[in-house]
Amino acid sequence: MRQSIFLILLLGCSKLFGQSEEVFPDYQEVTKDKNISEVVWTDEVSGNQVKTSYLENGVIRKEVYSDYKKAFSKYSIDGSFQYKYNGLTFPFERFYTNSNEDTLKVLYSYKDNKIVKREYWEYERRSKMRKGAPEYGDGKPAGCIVAEQDLIRYRKWVKDKFYSYIYNKGQLDKIQINYFRGGSPDVIISTYNEGKLTNRTELDRRKKTTNWEELYEYEGSKILMTKKYFVTYWGKIPPTEKWTTELDSFGREIKIARELDGLETKEILVRTFNEIGNIIRLSLTINESKKVFDYSVTYK
């Protein structure tokens, strides 16, 4: 049996376009060589080492990020991820922390090599009044602002959201999403034609309204996807997205382009593989001239 190594890319578009199942979200296969112990990502634009993955027996144990730019996103990643496996091919826990002591974890459950549950937790900062502290408030002698010495600060694991994956004849049919700190529950419904994904729609289960819809078309080795939004995010409805994904003869995504309606920009992500199938370069360019990042990948 071939051993596979998976590296978290966090590209901002974690799914493989046109896939019929979500085996492990956020992951892409990079190499099948289980003797690799370290993978280093260097940004040729800045000259900085932005990511290092540490592997053991063919699986990632830890990844360290430093200003790692995500594709199709304005955010960068700093901090470290640690993974626990419990004898599984895929991790059952991903633990994140950074220099600000922000702490998160994701728990995964599988059945028949397919993910069935995904839970997000945050190690939330909290505080409470110490026993015997004076009464604070308007008109009180102690005033309205609580003194630091009268606070007890502590942290507690709080569940943020929960994903449940439902399959029909081996294909991913629905993803039910529940939020535990506000927000209506959502469901993502997938539709197929002859085994190919043709439509994905996210619905607000409480309001019975459509949040967004993705339509897929196939032209040879290209997958065309249009994503349209129907609700506001951060005060406005996002522009319609048009994606073009090109596959090589092995079915790997080698080029992904995104265009936004109303904006004269075209973002292009390119993946380059070597002769044994290892990814050796990952670059993002805007309008074919401005390079956002250009990651070279070294295996040790």
Image (cartoon, grey):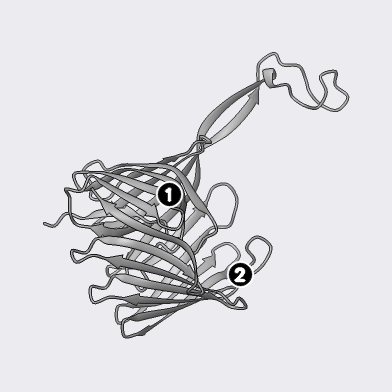
Q: Is residue 87 above or below residue 240?
A: above
- Numbered label attached to residue 115: none
- Residue 3 in the figure: left or right of residue 99: left
Q: Residue furthest right?
A: 139
Q: Residues within 10 Å of mark 2 (few under 14, many from 20)?
A: some
Going by the numbered disc 2, the residue's amino acid type is: Pro
- Residue 211 in the figure: left or right of residue 215: right
- Quarter of the rendering containing residue 141: top right
Q: Kindly tell me whether residue 293 is visible in this rendering.
A: yes
Residue at image position (43%, 55%) is 163
Q: Position of residue 152 (x, y in %)?
A: 62, 22
- Residue 286 in the figure: left or right of residue 49: right
Quadrant where the N terminus is found in the figure: bottom left
Going by the numbered disc 1, the residue's amino acid type is: Asn
Between the residue at mark 1 and the residue at mark 2, the CA separation in whole angstroms equals: 33 Å
- Numbered label attached to residue 238: 2
- Quarter of the rendering containing residue 16: bottom left
Q: Secondary structure at mark 2?
A: loop
Q: Which residue is mark 1?
A: 48
What is the tally of numbered marks visible in this picture? Answer: 2
Q: Kindly tell me whether residue 25 is visible in this rendering.
A: no
- Residue 31 in the figure: left or right of residue 50: left
Circles 1 and 2, Cβ within 8 Å, touching? The answer is no
Q: Secondary structure at mark 1?
A: loop
